[in-house]
Amino acid sequence: MMDKDTIAIAALPSQVDRSNAMAHGGMGGLVETGDATEADSHRCKPGERRVTFRFLVSQDEEHVRLELGVGGSAVDLGERAHHQTLLLLARERRGDESQGVVSSEAGWRDVVSLGAMLGIDTQHINTHLFRALRQLSPALGQLAIELDLVERRRGQVRFGGAAFEVVDWRGIPVRA
């Protein structure tokens, strides 16, 4: 069972060196999931604190900054390449949901297609997911938030379903 200070993150791809992760302080709340149903069991429950991912994007969307909002406070996580990967996954999930795709199937993308969308190879996708986990685990732990950041099933990944918004650098909403 997980405690309040860990977050549930779906399993990273097998190519990620898990022994390296263990050597750097454990798996940091990494939870392997076989399917979406199991991963859904780790989501925030009603009444628990909710986090909102706020993606701040440049006009050409080449630069993505991320803030985590909880209640009236925000944690600025800066601009990182892996934030662009999270943004794409979040947009893909929202797009599927808006088209009426069943929630359990919404947002799943195979890593090869995801790499093509981002213009990077599969191994780089794995690195982005690992870096996102490494960066967000302490921030979410400080806020006592437990959620699925990214879910994974054989050959596919998706955004974990946390609330998010996309704004430009001035704070004006853009297409999510």
Image (cartoon, rainbow, N blue to C red):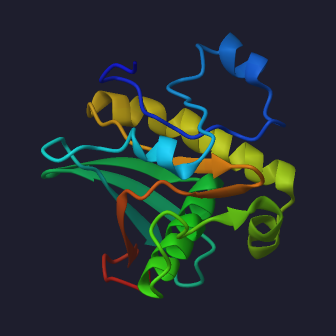
Q: Residue 114 in the image: x percent, y percent? A: 74, 67
Near-viewer residue (33 or 82): 33
Q: Residue 21 in the image: x percent, y percent? A: 69, 21
Quadrant of the frame with the C terminus = bottom left
Quadrant of the frame with the N terminus = top left
Near-viewer residue (46 or 30): 46
Q: In this view, does 18 lie above or below 67?
A: above
Q: Is residue 11 above or below residue 87?
A: above
Q: Image point 12% across, 44% down: which residue?
A: 47
Q: In this view, does 32 lie to the left or right of 66?
A: right
Q: Image point 44% across, 68% down: which residue?
A: 103
Q: In this view, does 59 lie to the left or right of 123?
A: left
Q: Residue 96 in the image: x percent, y percent? A: 52, 79
Total number of numbered labels?
0
Q: In this view, does 107 lie above or below 33?
A: below
Near-viewer residue (133 or 159): 159
Residue 110: name its quadrant.
bottom right
Q: Image point 43% across, 47% down: which residue?
A: 40
Near-viewer residue (6 or 42): 42
Residue 139: name its quadrant.
top left
Q: Is residue 110 above or below residue 136?
A: below
Q: Residue 144 in the image: x percent, y percent? A: 26, 30
Q: Image point 36% across, 36% down: which residue?
A: 140
